Image (cartoon, grey):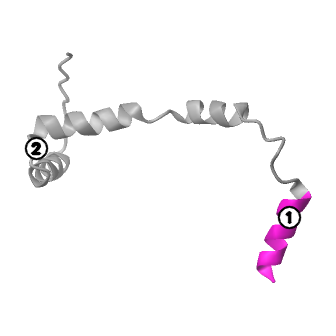
Amino acid sequence: MTTLYIRDVSDDVATTLKERAAAAGMSLSAYVNTELAKIAARPTNAQVAARLRARDRSSGPTTDEIVAAVQADRR
């Protein structure tokens, strides 16, 4: 397991993180580790864009159907 040291964290940010950790019943280290794991698990914007480009959209609505639906909602 790797150890990270984070420098120059503002007092406001540190205080907020400590409060959130306490509210969750966790140490600051455990809380920050959990939050970093959540961030690391999220796909990057590039990964999301690549997945969207790879999708098969041949069975979706046509442009005309979309425009008609939008216009119908505006009436």
Question: Magenta residues?
Answer: 64-75
Going by the picture, which residue comes out furthest to the top? 1
Give the number of the disc on residue 26. Answer: 2
At x 71% / y 30%, what residue is drawn?
54
Does 19 appear above or below 33?
A: below
Position of the N terminus, as image quadrant, is top left
Residue 49, picture quadrant: top right
Query: Residue 64 location, x and y as percent?
Result: 91, 60
Depth check: give the residue in front, 55 or 44: 55
Does 73 appear above or below 67?
A: below
* Left or right of residue 69, residue 23 in this image: left
Instruction: Assess disc 2: are there few (<14), some (14-19) or many (≥20) residues with their C-alpha within 10 Å of its C-alpha.
Output: some
**Mark 1 highlights which residue?**
67
Query: Residue 72 location, x and y as percent?
Result: 83, 76
At x 77% / y 36%, what residue is drawn?
56
Q: Is residue 71 magenta?
A: yes
Residue 61, picture quadrant: bottom right
Position of the C terminus, as image quadrant, is bottom right
Does 73 appear above or below 41?
A: below
* Left or right of residue 16, residue 60 in this image: right
Q: Amino acid at mark 2?
A: Met
Q: Amino acid at mark 1?
A: Val
Magenta portion: prevailing SS class: helix
Give the number of the disc on residue 3. Answer: none
* Left or right of residue 59, residue 22 in this image: left
Mark 1 or mark 2, which has the lower sequence index? 2
Q: Is residue 59 magenta?
A: no
Assign a secondary structure to mark 1: helix
Assign a secondary structure to mark 2: loop
Residue 58, picture quadrant: top right
Label 1, label 2: how far apart the Cα atoms are = 51 Å
